[in-house]
Amino acid sequence: GIQVEQSPPDLILQEGANSTLRCNFSDSVNNLQWFHQNPWGQLINLFYIPSGTKQNGRLSATTVATERYSLLYISSSQTTDSGVYFCAVATGANNLFFGTGTRLTVIP
Amino acid sequence: DAGITQSPRYKITETGRQVTLMCHQTWSHSYMFWYRQDLGHGLRLIYYSAAADITDKGEVPDGYVVSRSKTENFPLTLESATRSQTSVYFCASSEYSGTSGRNEQFFGPGTRLTVL
């Protein structure tokens, strides 16, 4: 399967700070998704972004498919941003291959 | 619109018992998936289905059985539960577009299963 590496594994931020999470993957993909797993365990879809750049409020993401990486930007972080952020990729209609996530803790 | 639901949300069972986890989606998505989430492994695919009556194994299928008689339902059965199957189980669905290539997956709330 496709290898997905996320960095950093853990991140602690002061409220209001900005951060960048990185996702590297080992093969060409046609699906890349970013998820937020909240403290209650729910997986929330953040972005479907196999290529290009998207923004949604304080969050934005960029995928450079030719170089096999994606970045998730969180600006002006809030305590509600805490949780684990997963990057997942797929080819065709197949299953997603997940990274092991970045655990974000935002301190008030 | 309920989206994708799973039941039960929590289950405690004993080694050797049969357990069925239910997944239901209201979007009429063709594809459905079962993943398990374990510490240190992220999410890994157990089984998936491309349509009713079509299922295939994923990365970790041993000890699990699936069926899909209706598009909206995709139950996962542990025929004889073992302690190593203690995990959080997520169901997902997607509608793959051959034209655009879009295949965004949406996840249910998960079922936390403990096998004693």
Image (cartoon, coloured by chain):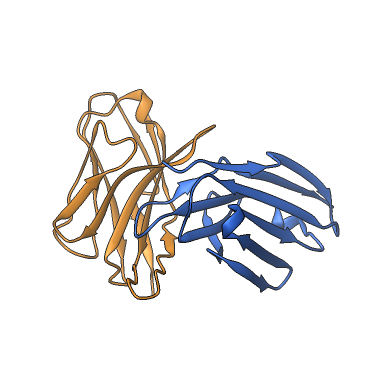
- Which x, y percent locates residue B16? 23, 24
Q: Quadrant of the N terminus of chain A?
A: top left
Nearest the viewer among B70 and A75 is: A75
Nearest the viewer among A82 and B9 is: A82
Does residue B19 sit above or below B49 in this rendering?
above
Location of residue B49 by image quarter:
bottom left
Q: Is A42 on the left-hand or right-hand side of B83?
A: right
- Which x, y percent locates residue A57? 71, 73
Residue lying at the far front of the rendered structure = A66
Q: Is A35 on the left-hand or right-hand side of B31?
A: right
Residue sitting at x 64%, y 69%: A53
Q: Is B19 on the left-hand or right-hand side of A61?
A: left
Residue sitting at x 68%, y 39%: A9
**Picture colour for chain B:** orange
Does residue A8 sit above or below A29 in this rendering?
above
Q: Is residue B116 visible?
A: no
Does residue B29 sit above or below B55 in this rendering?
below
- Which x, y percent locates residue B109? 44, 55
Chain shown in blue:
A
Q: Is residue B101 visible?
A: yes
Does residue B3 sit above or below B50 in this rendering?
below
Residue sitting at x 68%, y 42%: A7
Nearest the viewer among B71 and A27 is: A27
- Which x, y percent locates residue B22? 28, 52
Q: How many marks?
A: 0
